[in-house]
Amino acid sequence: MNRIMATLRPDLAVIAGHVAPGAKVLDVGCGDGTLMAALRDERGCDVRGLEIDPHNVAECVGHGLSAIQGDADTDLALYPDASFDYAILSQTLQTTKRPDMVLEELLRIGRRAFVSFPNFGHWRVRSDLLWRGRMPVTRLLPVGWYETPNIHHLTIADFRDFVAARGLKVEGAWYLNGDSLISPAMATWRAEHAVYLLSRG
């Protein structure tokens, strides 16, 4: 693994490692452009970003990345059909107002879509709710209920049902416990995060 890929957040490293070299990519909720830079510099991709935070957009532009300010809930409609090989939504699905519509837009814009999200069915989350009766605060969910950007709390089981009900094809699925990949067995309990690669069935 090269130096830049090794510094990526684990879910971003999974995504970057499975994007085809030279692909055209839209990173929705691109943050400061860390993934965009890795895809550009290490995979030779043509990468564009959409980001709601103007300070993050400025940081992307300052690093020579093509990013614009926009909201995934409203601004994806501006992109033409099949205009990207991949549309990426990392750790953002649960923060959108209508994740179902956002995912539909991702698969309209991109031939494939990467989606990563925290698994609220992880055993530590279940334990906090069961034994303490409180919303959990963990390393990967580090803020209290009143300040979290997460407005939809989904589990891996929820997402699997969601995808199946819509007839979407799962081309790949990866599960992370901390910084390590784990097997799909018991992922609904053991995985803190999940990454899916989807396409139209």
Image: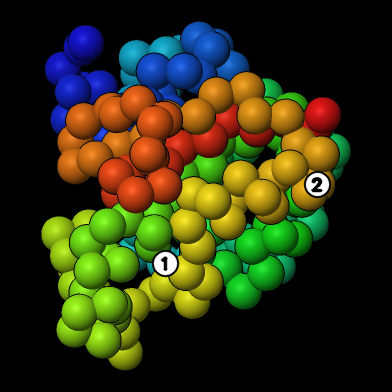
User: How many residues crowd mark 2 within 10 Å: few (<14), some (14–19), many (20+)?
Assistant: few
For image coordinates 32% across by 44% down, the residue present is 191
Which residue type carries mark 1? Answer: Asp
Residue 166 — which label?
Answer: 2
Q: Where is residue 119 shown, x and y percent of the image?
A: 39, 54
Sequence-first disc among 1 and 2? 1
Left or right of 195 in this view: 133? left
Residue 111 image-quadrant placement: top right
Q: Of residues 90 and 164, which is closer to you in this image?
A: 164
> What separation in Å lies between label 1 and label 2 (alpha carbons)?
31 Å
For the residue labelled by badge 1, is the local secondary structure a helix, a strand or a loop?
A: loop
Residue 8 image-quadrant placement: top left
Note whether 142 is above or below 8 in the view shown. Answer: below
Q: Where is residue 104 shown, x and y percent of the image?
A: 77, 50
Left or right of 8 in this view: 68? right
For the residue labelled by badge 2, is the local secondary structure a helix, a strand or a loop?
A: loop
Left or right of 67 in this view: 34? left
In the rendered image, is residue 135 in sight? yes
For image coordinates 45% across by 13% down, the residue present is 44
| Image quarter (top left, top right, bottom left or bottom right) of the C terminus | top right
Which residue type carries mark 2? Answer: Arg
Residue 104 — which label?
Answer: none
Note whether 18 is above or below 142 in the view shown. Answer: above
Q: Of residues 83 and 14, which is closer to you in this image?
A: 14
For image coordinates 54% across by 51% down, the residue present is 157
Q: Where is residue 83 shown, x and y percent of the image?
A: 76, 32
Tag 1 residue: 53
Note whether 93 is above or below 171 in the view shown. Answer: below
